[in-house]
Structures are given as C-alpha cells and as structure tokens.
Image (tube, grey):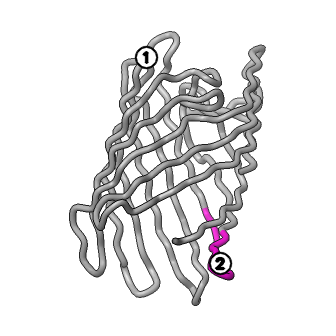
Amino acid sequence: MHDRAELSFDDAGERQDDGYFYKDELALYLEYGLTERITLVTRAAWQTVERRSGADFDSARGFSATEIGLRRSLFVTGRQVVSVEAMAILPGEGENISDQPLGDGGNAWEARALWGGNLSSRLFADAQLAYRRREGGYSDEARLDLTLGWQPALRWHVFAQEFSVWSLDTPRPDAREFEQHKLQLSVGREIGGLEYDLGATLTPAGRNTIDERAFFLSVWRRF
C-alpha cells in the first residue's frame, strides 16, 4: 500500500494544512479454517511511516499493530452467513491507533459481528460491526465496515467498500475525540489460481484525523 495525506481534519471536521503523512505498507492477511465453523484470522503489517503535524515530526519503521483472533459461524444458508469474531490486537513500532504518536497504543480486544449474503447471482454484500476495547487509557472504538461486490464476468470482481471508526470515550487533553470514514474501490481478476486486486482509498470525512489517499495491490490465494 502506498498511502499519502497532505491535509488533515480538525475538531470541527474541516480540512486543514498543518503537515503531512506518508506510509508504505506490506501486509499479510490469513484466514485458516480450524473446523467447519471456526476460522483463525490474523493480520500483520510492516510499515515505513513519516508524519509531520505543525512543528512535531514522527517516524517509524517496523510492524504496526498485529491482529489475531477466531471467527465462529452461527447461521449458514445457501445465500447468507452470520458470524461472530473475537480478536486480540498487539501494538507495534508503527501506526497502532488514530490521533496518537507512532508506536503508542496498548493491547486491545475486539468483538465483531459479521453478516454476508448473495443479493443475486452476481451481486453480494457484507456488513461488519465491531467494538474495540483499548488498554492503557486510550479511547475505545466503534467500527463499521460495509462491502458491496459485483461479478461482471467470469474471474472478474469489483468491490465498493466503506470503513468507519469512532472514538467512544470522553475526550481529554491527550486523547481527543476522533472519527474517520474511508471509501475504497477495487477491481480484481483471477489469473492462474491467484486473485489480483488493484484499488484506491480516499477519506471524504473525519475529525482529528488525517485525510488519506492510498493505492494498493493485493494478491489472494485460496488453499
């Protein structure tokens, strides 16, 4: 992922020019079925990050927060599935939490509810709602992820996605309220047993967070 921000959102949600944010990231995401209903889920990412805000400069090179958890399906039919997920988040040297210095952020725990379903033979949707509990005095978070997928032709797919996060705790001088809303569009093609996705992300709205623009290439393999 190649991620850049030249603007940020202030406390009123207005864009401001007070610095920049540069991030290059290589991530590994794995889902592995342990049983028919239980799936191991994990994500780790290596980052090179620089951030300037006013007179403050911050940089890091290393792993960001690593996620590991278990997902259990509760309800499965031919057209939809409902699952729950429990996740542990372990902090790293890079970006761990919004609106905090790089490397900051204690351990966190997340509970997530997931729904996915086929809307037609070529159209599908996914919705996920999560509560993230953070240790060390950092704000807890609510998260909402939405996906709409379309298969225009054999071996092709298009994803339109929305990712939102809101802080939940009472603001303090060292922990402001924040929220961020991202839109992502990607196009994928299956070639030789692998799936390649090329996409872009933008941030139409937020508070006390950066206005990100990103491009990414992902490679998926089913086994």
The amino acid type of the residue labelled 2 equals Arg
Nearer to me, 125 or 86: 86
User: Is 190 covered by the magenta stretch?
Assistant: yes
User: Is 137 covered by the magenta stretch?
Assistant: no
Q: Secondary structure at mark 2?
A: strand
Q: Earlier in the sequence, mark 2 or mark 1?
A: 1
Residue 13: x and y, percent? 56, 33
Which residue, given by chain and number where applicable, does mark 1 sit on?
136
Magenta segment, prevailing SS (helix, strand or loop): strand
The amino acid type of the residue labelled 1 equals Gly
10 Å crowding of disc 1: few (<14), some (14-19), many (20+): few
10 Å crowding of disc 2: few (<14), some (14-19), many (20+): some
Which residue, given by chain and number where applicable, does mark 2 sit on?
189
Q: Residue at x 59, y 69 (%)?
A: 221
Nearer to me, 61 or 33: 33
Q: Residue at x 48, y 22 (%)?
A: 106
The extreme left residue here reads 75
Q: Against 201, is 185 above or below? A: below
In this rendering, position of residue 32 left or right of residue 8:
left
* The quarter of the displayed image where residue 139 is located: top left
The extreme top residue here reads 173
Residue 155: x and y, percent? 60, 84
Q: Residue at x 30, y 73 (%)?
A: 80
Residue 68: x and y, percent? 45, 43
Q: Over which residues does the magenta segment extend?
A: 185-196
Q: Secondary structure at mark 1?
A: loop
State the CA–CA distance, disc 2 to disc 1.
Answer: 43 Å
